[in-house]
């Protein structure tokens, strides 16, 4: 059997980052930047008010107080979006709104709450400090300043920053398009009644959600019957919109495992046993005229999920240009005891609880049994305990490696 590392390294050697695309900002949301981004101008682009109030000269309001307010003439009214053509002379001020450019001669902004809000004169009852409530040009971002590094994921704040500095398009690694299908004549779609011997197709839903969580654009095809021609036709039809294909089921040694039967003779797919539990039967290769990567995962839900986490997710992240491909692994104290098969890396569904004190280890509790069909316990897990190949027994209270989901 191949080791987990050998199988994963073989996959990552054949999967490359997708070619960059220039996209509109909202279409680029969630993708990784290809290039460093620098501001071409100052942000804010001009001195402006951070409050609704009055632009004043300090000397005119130095003695303002509740008992003896200062009264000034209001010589201008400046809303946001205008360009004031006024200079403050001694004894004058200008009413100003948040975000409006400050007029010449302004040394501070008096918030409207410190005044009677008057026009054409205003009574001011408190004196501001020099520069108070003035946003200076470039105090957020200066022209030429690097604002986002290459490889940055474009979240909401990053998209907002790009818009603020005037970028409406940006070069990113596109999200990989993943086609996901389940195989098996026994599968029925959710919402439809079951007959004898049938089960519902959960894998295609689960893996589509997992691919989306990994940053991909995922298309759920649904289930395909155990018919070689139907499988070939479905895969070939889907290649036009796929950067990656993921199948689940039909990769063991049964008489009706059509995925293995069909793909062994189509493309470069190799079916191998990997020293892991769950998820020992694995297939990977390329298919079609564009050498589209294809993952063939086991059919049991937990096996399919673990296989996705260990092999497919890192590949999808690599295609997006990510530097970190692996889930975070931490140490925790295991609250249960269990045995593990010799020579296989075991992944145990578990619930991880952070430590209340930095001096203590976090706690991890195994959930459910070891069966690879137990999707109920999988839904309760937020982590996987990773047991090395040479460890056959984990004792209660032992320190274990935990992959955080």
Image: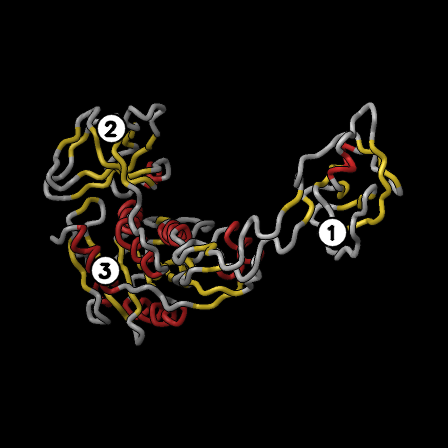
- Closer mark to the observer between disc 3 and disc 1: 1
Crowd around label 1: few <14 · some 14–19 · many ≥20 (10 Å): some
Depth check, front residue: 79 or 142: 142
The answer to the question of whether label 2 and label 3 lie on touching residues, with beta carbons closer than 8 A, is no
The answer to the question of whether label 1 and label 2 lie on touching residues, with beta carbons closer than 8 A, is no
Under tag 1, what secondary structure? loop
- Closer mark to the observer between disc 1 and disc 2: 1
Q: Is residue 56 left or right of residue 266?
A: right
Estimate the x, y position of residue 79 in percent, counting from the top left. 77, 51
Q: Is residue 104 visible?
A: yes
Q: CA distance from mark 2 to mark 3?
A: 32 Å
- Total marks in image: 3
The answer to the question of whether label 3 and label 1 lie on touching residues, with beta carbons closer than 8 A, is no
Depth check, front residue: 19 or 347: 19
Q: Which residue is depicted at the point 30% across and 57% down? A: 315
Depth check, front residue: 374 or 155: 155
Under tag 2, what secondary structure? strand
Give me the disc on residue 11: 3
Q: On the image, numbered disc 2 is attached to which residue?
A: 334
Q: Is residue 188 visible?
A: no
Q: Which residue is depicted at the point 26% across and 59% down? A: 296
Estimate the x, y position of residue 200 in percent, counting from the top left. 38, 49
Q: On the image, numbered disc 1 is attached to which residue?
A: 104
Estimate the x, y position of residue 29 in percent, counting from the top left. 49, 57
Q: Earlier in the sequence, mark 2 or mark 3?
A: 3
Q: Which image quadrant is residue 377 in?
A: top left
Under tag 3, what secondary structure? helix
Q: Which residue is depicted at the point 31% across and 66% down? A: 231
């Amino acid at each position: 059997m191949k080791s987990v590392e050998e199988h994963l390294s073989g996959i990552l050697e054949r999967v490359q980052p997708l070619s960059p695309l220039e996209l509109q900002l909202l279409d680029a949301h969630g993708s990784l930047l290809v290039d460093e981004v620098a501001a071409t101008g100052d942000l804010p682009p001009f001195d402006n008010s951070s409050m609704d109030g009055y632009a004043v000269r300090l000397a005119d309001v130095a003695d303002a107080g509740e008992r003896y307010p200062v009264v000034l003439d209001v010589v201008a009214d400046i809303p946001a979006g205008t360009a004031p053509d006024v200079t403050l002379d001694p004894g004058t001020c200008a009413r100003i709104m948040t975000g409006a450019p400050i007029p010449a001669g302004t040394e501070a902004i008096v918030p409207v709450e410190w005044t009677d809000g008057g026009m054409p004169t205003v009574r001011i009852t408190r004196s501001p400090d020099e520069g108070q409530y003035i946003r200076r040009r470039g105090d957020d971002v200066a022209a030429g300043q690097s604002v986002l590094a290459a490889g940055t994921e474009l979240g909401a704040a990053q998209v907002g920053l790009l818009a603020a500095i005037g970028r409406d398009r940006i070069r990113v690694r596109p999200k990989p398009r993943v086609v996901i299908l389940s195989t098996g004549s026994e599968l029925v779609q959710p919402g439809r009644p079951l007959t004898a011997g049938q089960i519902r197709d959960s894998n295609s839903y689960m893996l589509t959600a997992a691919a989306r969580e990994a940053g991909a654009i995922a298309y759920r095809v649904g289930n395909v019957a155990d018919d070689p021609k139907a499988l070939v036709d479905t895969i070939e039809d889907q290649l036009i919109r796929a950067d990656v294909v993921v199948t689940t089921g039909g990769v063991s040694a049964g008489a009706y495992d059509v995925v293995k039967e069909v793909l062994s003779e189509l493309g470069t797919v190799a079916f191998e046993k990997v020293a892991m539990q769950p998820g020992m039967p694995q297939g990977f290769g390329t298919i079609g005229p564009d050498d589209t990567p294809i993952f063939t995962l086991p059919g049991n839900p937990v096996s399919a999920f673990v296989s996705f986490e260990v092999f497919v997710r890192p590949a999808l992240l690599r295609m997006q240009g990510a530097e970190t491909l692996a889930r975070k692994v931490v140490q925790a104290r295991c609250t249960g005891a269990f045995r593990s098969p010799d020579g296989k890396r075991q992944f145990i569904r578990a619930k991880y609880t952070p430590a209340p004190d930095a001096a203590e280890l976090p706690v991890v509790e195994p959930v459910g049994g070891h069966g690879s069909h137990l999707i109920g316990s999988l839904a309760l897990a937020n982590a996987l305990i990773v047991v090395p190949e040479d460890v056959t027994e984990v004792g209660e209270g032992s320190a274990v490696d935990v992959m955080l989901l």
